[in-house]
Amino acid sequence: MSYKTIVVHVDHDRRASVRIQAAAALANRFGAHLVGLHATTPARIPNYVRSEVVADIIAHEREARRAVDVEMAARFDQIATRAGVDSREWRLSNHDPVDALTLHARYADLLVLGQSDPDEENAWLSADVAEHVALEGGRPVLVIPYAGDFPYIGKRIVLGWNASLEATRAMTDALPLLRQAERVTLLTVNADAGERGRGGEHTGSHGDMPGADCALYLARHGVQVEVSHDPGVEIDTGNYLLSRATDLETDLLVMGAWGHTRLRELIMGGVTRTLMQHMTIPVLLSH
C-alpha cells in the first residue's frame, strides 16, 4: 500500500499555504496525485427576500467568490509546482464544506486538513470537522496544526496503541509513513493484558505483553519499532500522548479516532478531542 491520491483542503485562512506545502511534500515523496479542494457553500437567500435584493449585489457576491477561487487555485498551483508535483488537479465544490470533504476523501488515500484556529475570525469550518470526516469518510485524515512549520512529516512517529479497531485502522493506514520513518515508538498507556484463560493465555486484547503483537506485525512490514508501555498514568491519555510526543521529539502522532461513542466523547471530552484542541504536531486520525 502507498498513497496514490492525496486531497488537501484549500481555503482562505492564513494557514492554507502551510497545509498545501505539507500535502505537496507528501505527494512528491510518494509519487501521488495531488488534489486541491476548495469547498464553499453559496449564500442562500430566502425566497421572500429575493425580490428585495438588487441584482447587481448578487452578481457582485458571485464575482467576489469567483475571484477568491482563482486566487486560491493559483496559490495551490504555485506551491505544488515548487514542490515538484506534476500530477495535480484543482476541484471546486459548491456543497457544504464538511460534506464535500467527506465525499472527496472516499476516493483518496489521504485527506489533509488544518486544525481549527480559535483566533481565526473568518473560519468556515467547525472545530470538529477532522473528527467528522475521519468518522464518515472512511479514509485517514492528516491534521496540520494551526501553528508551526512542518517541512517533513513522519521522520519520528508515535503510534498511540490501545488495541482497538480504530487504532488498528490507523496503524494500517499509516504504513506508508511508518515504513519510511527513522524511528517509530509504539506507545501503550495504562494497558491491561486482561485475565488468563483456561490455557493460561491472556484474554485481553493486548496479549501477554501490551504492544508486542503489534510491534511484530509492523516488523513484518519492514517497520523499525520500539515499544513503550506506560502503566499507572494518572493524567488523561490525550495530554499524556502529547507530552510523550514532545519528549520524543516526534513530528507525527498516529491514532484511532472516536475510541468511545460520539455521545460519550461530546459529553466527557475524550482523547480525540483533546488532541484536536491542543496538538502541536501533525496528527493522523483513522476510524
Image: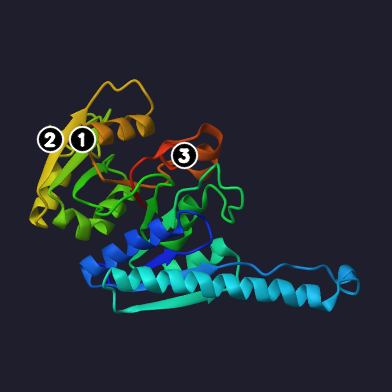
Q: Which residue is denoted by mark 2 in the rendering?
A: 199
Question: Would you say 2 lies left or right of 12 here?
Answer: left
Q: Secondary structure at mark 2?
A: loop
- Depth check, front residue: 30 or 81: 81
Q: Position of residue 80 (x, y in %)?
A: 34, 71
Type of residue at label 3?
Gln
Q: Compute the Cα span from label 3 to label 1.
A: 20 Å
Q: Position of residue 199 (x, y in %)?
A: 12, 35
Q: Residues within 10 Å of mark 1 (few under 14, many from 20)?
A: some
Type of residue at label 2?
Gly
Q: Quadrant of residue 7?
A: bottom left
Q: Which residue is denoted by mark 3 in the rendering?
A: 277
* Nearer-N-terminus badge (2/1): 2
Given this view, does label 2 or label 3 mark the residue nearer the observer? 3
Q: Which residue is denoted by mark 1 in the rendering?
A: 248
Q: Are marks 2 and 3 in contact (CB under 8 Å)?
A: no
Q: Residues within 10 Å of mark 3 (few under 14, many from 20)?
A: some
Residue appearing at x 42%, y 60% in the figure:
17
